[in-house]
Image (cartoon, helix red, strand yellow):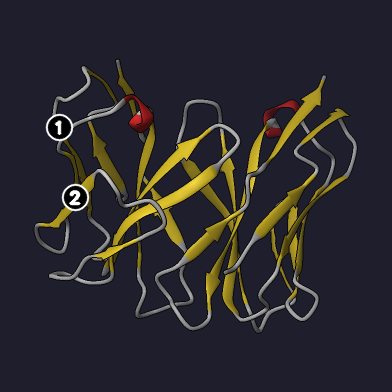
């Protein structure tokens, strides 16, 4: 099925550990995004990639890095996890050049940092 | 900075009722507005997308309207069902920065059998 695939679905990390969240889309979309969702704070943009080879900071980039590996894949890395990064992370993609389209979201990664 | 507000934060209605969810935004320079549904522990599912030039979009029992000049959108759900219980979010896409979507905090809907 066409869509956005995120791995892993669940992860528990100890403070200071690192990990990479993976995201891949098979819709040939140019733009990809990483959001975090926290209770009472809604969805907040961490980083986005408007096209292959470019990345830009969103609202809450501190503590994260991203890589747009190719048109399909956009990864999010936590270099040294902190309890404040406990959240649900969503990857999304969009055909930005055809701006009449909206977002397609992955099913999320639930991350707990202890 | 664009701010998106959804009222009410939570809503509980009996099955069969027609209902309206509200979304307001502070900057009318938007390209489009999208309504999503999120079930507990799940991702976001797109329901309707309205371009800034449109007034409304319909899909089955759902109708979304957009009044760009007043910064408002509504999602109308007809003949609500328990299966409609979920959190509904709206997001606006900026007219001048296509890569910025701004989300509301959502309305949590509970439809009682």
Mark 2 touches mark 1? (CB < 8 Å): no
In the image, what residue occupies the spot 46% across and 31% down? B42
Left or right? Give the position of A56 relative to B75. Answer: left
For the residue pair A73 and B17, the one nearer the viewer reads as: A73
Asked which secondary structure carries label 2, the reply is: strand
Residue A58 point in image, percent of width and height: 37, 60
Residue at the spot of label 1: A19
Indicate which disc residue A65 carries: 2
Residue A65 point in image, percent of width and height: 19, 50
Left or right? Give the position of B31 relative to A68. Answer: right
For the residue pair A13 and A30, the one nearer the viewer reads as: A13
- Which chain letter matches label 1? A
The Cα–Cα distance between marks 2 and 1, rounded to whole angstroms, is 11 Å
The answer to whether residue A44 is above or below residue A70 is above
Asked which secondary structure carries label 1, the reply is: strand
Determine which quarter of the picture holds residue A15. top left
Left or right? Give the position of A45 relative to B23. Answer: left
- How dense is the environment of label 2, judged by Cα within 10 Å: few (below 14), some, or many (20 and up)? some
Q: What count of labels does the image hold?
A: 2
Residue B71 point in image, percent of width and height: 75, 72
Q: Quadrant of the N terminus of chain B?
A: bottom right
In the image, what residue occupies the spot 44% across and 78% down? B97
């Amino acid at each position: 099925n066409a869509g956005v695939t995120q791995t892993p679905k669940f992860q528990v990390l100890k403070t200071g550990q690192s990990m990479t969240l993976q995201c891949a889309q098979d819709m040939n979309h140019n733009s990809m995004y990483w959001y975090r969702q926290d209770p009472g704070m809604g969805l907040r943009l961490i980083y986005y990639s408007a096209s292959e080879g470019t990345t830009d900071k969103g609202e809450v980039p501190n503590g994260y890095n991203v890589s747009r590996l190719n048109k399909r894949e956009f990864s999010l890395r936590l270099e040294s996890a902190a309890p404040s990064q406990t959240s649900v992370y969503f990857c999304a993609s969009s055909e930005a050049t055809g701006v009449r389209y909206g977002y397609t979201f992955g099913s999320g990664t639930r991350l707990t940092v202890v | 900075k664009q701010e998106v507000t959804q009222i009410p934060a939570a809503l509980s209605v009996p099955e069969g009722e027609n209902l309206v969810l509200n979304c307001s935004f502070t900057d009318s320079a938007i390209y489009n507005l999208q309504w999503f549904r999120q079930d507990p522990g799940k991702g976001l599912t797109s329901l309707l997308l309205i371009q800034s030039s449109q007034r409304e979009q319909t899909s089955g029992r759902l109708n979304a309207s957009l009044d760009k000049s007043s910064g408002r959108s509504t999602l109308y759900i007809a003949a609500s069902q328990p299966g409609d219980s979920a959190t509904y979010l709206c997001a606006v896409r900026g007219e001048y920065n296509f890569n910025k979507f701004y989300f509301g905090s959502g309305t949590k809907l509970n439809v009682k059998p």
